[in-house]
Image (cartoon, grey):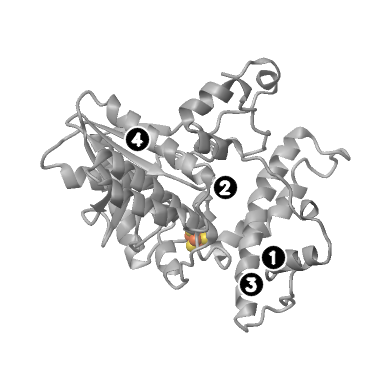
Amino acid sequence: MGPGKHALLGPSSAARWLNCTPSARLEEAVPNEGTKYTREGTLAHALGELKLRNYFTVMNKRTFNAQMKKLKADELYSSEMDGHTERYFDFARELALAFPSQPVLEIEDSLDLSRWVPEGFGTADLVLLSSETLHVVDFKYGQGHAVSAERNPQLMLYALGAYEKYRMFYQPETIRMSVFQPRIREEAGTWEITRTELLQWAEEVVKPAAALAFAGEGEPVPGDHCLFCRVKGQCRACSAPYASAAEDFAKLDGPKAPALLSDREIGKALALAEPLAAWLASVKDYALGAVLEGREIPGWKAVEGRSVRRFTDQDAAFDALKAHGVAEEILYERVPLTLAQAEKAVGKADFQLFAGAFIEKPRGKPALVPEGDPRPAFSPAAADFQPLA
Ligand code: SF4
C-alpha cells in the first residue's frame, strides 16, 4: 500500500505490533515524517494506480492524460519509475487474465479489519477475487529491503480485510498473496494458504496481539521487525543485545584462538555486527534530532556537514562565461538517452525490433546478505558460464 492515512494498528506496521505489542503506542508520540523515499513511493503508487484504472475501469482519455501530466510534473518522477510501474501494470494484467473467468478486481481497496483489530483498517493495492481464489497484491517501490510474501502479516491482513468485505458473496478456499518489488526482483514473490488457516491465524494470533497492542501492553520484543520502528533509536529492549555484542564476539572461539579469524567466525561476526550498525545509525538519528531541537546529549554536538558549491542561476552564469569568450562547446556536452528513455521515445516494439540485438541484461553485482534474504543465492559458476535467458 502507498503511504497515506494510517490506523494505529495498520497492516503496514503489523510485523511490529504483532511481535512487539507496546510498539504502536510508543511510536504514537513520534511524528511519522515523510522522507524522499516515502514521497517517491507515494508517487510510484499513484502512477501504478492510474495505469491500472485506465485499463481496468472506465476512464476517459482526457482525464487519464491530465492526471498523468500532473504526476509526471512531480520532481520525483523518472523514466525508471515509469518503467517499473509499467511492469506492475503488466503483472496485474497477467494475474487477471490467469483467472479462469473474469475476477472481481479492486484497485486501492479500502478494507475494514475491526473484527480482529481495534479501529483497524488498511488499503490493499490490488484485490482479485473469484469464488475459488482471493489474490491480494502489494506493490513495493522500495529498493533497500527485500520483502517476502511468505507469512507476511501485512499481506495476510489485507487478505483478511478483503475476505471480510466480500464474504457475503464469495467464500474462496485459496488465499494467495503477492509482493511485487520491481527494483529488487524481476518476478513477484507469491505465497498462498487456505481460508481456514488465514481465519485461524486471525483468531489465534492477530486478535489477542491487537488487543494488547491497542492497550499499549506487553513486553517490548526486539527483532527484524524493529527496522522501521520510529522509537528504535531510544528503545531500551532494542539496545540491550548490542551492549553485550563485543563480549559475545570475544568469546567466539575461546581464549586460545588463532591470530586470524576463521570463516565460521567471520559469519558470526557479521551476524553480530550488522544489526549493530543499523541500530547505531538510528541512535545517531535520534540524537542529532534531539541536539537540533536544543536538547543536550552529553558528549555530543552537531556540526555543519560537508557541502558542495552550486549555481544560484546556471543560465546567468553560462551567459556571463560566454560573454567573456568561453565557447559553448566547452560548457555543454552531448549526452545519449538512457536505455529506458530511448525505449520510451521510440516505442517498445520498434525499440526491440531495431535495437534488441544490442541489448543485454548483465548479472547484478554480488552483494552479501543474511541467509534468510528471499533472493536466490548468487552462483559464481553460473555467472561465468551460463548464457543469459
Ligand atoms: S524498537 Fe523497541 S519498541 Fe520498536 S519494535 Fe523494536 S523492540 Fe519494539
Sequence-first disc among 1 and 2: 2
Residue 204: x and y, percent?
29, 46
- Residue 126 in view in this figure: no
Residue 248: x and y, percent?
71, 50
Q: Which residue is mark 3?
A: 287
Q: Which mark is residue 92?
A: 4
Q: Amino acid at mark 1?
A: Gln
Q: Nearer the viewer, mark 1 or mark 4?
A: 1
Sequence-first disc among 2 and 3: 2
- Distance of label 2 from label 4 (alpha carbons): 23 Å
Give above or below for 354 relative to 31.
above
Q: Amino acid at mark 3?
A: Ala
Q: Residue at x 28, y 53 (%)?
A: 207
Q: Which residue is mark 1?
A: 314
Q: Nearer the viewer, mark 2 or mark 4?
A: 4
Nearer-the-camera pick, 258 or 267: 267
Nearer-the-camera pick, 92 or 265: 92
Residue at the extreme bottom of the image, as rendered: 294
- Distance of label 1 from label 2 (alpha carbons): 33 Å
Q: Which residue is mark 2?
A: 144
Residue 220: x and y, percent?
47, 61
Q: Nearer the viewer, mark 1 or mark 2?
A: 1
Q: Amino acid at mark 2?
A: Gly
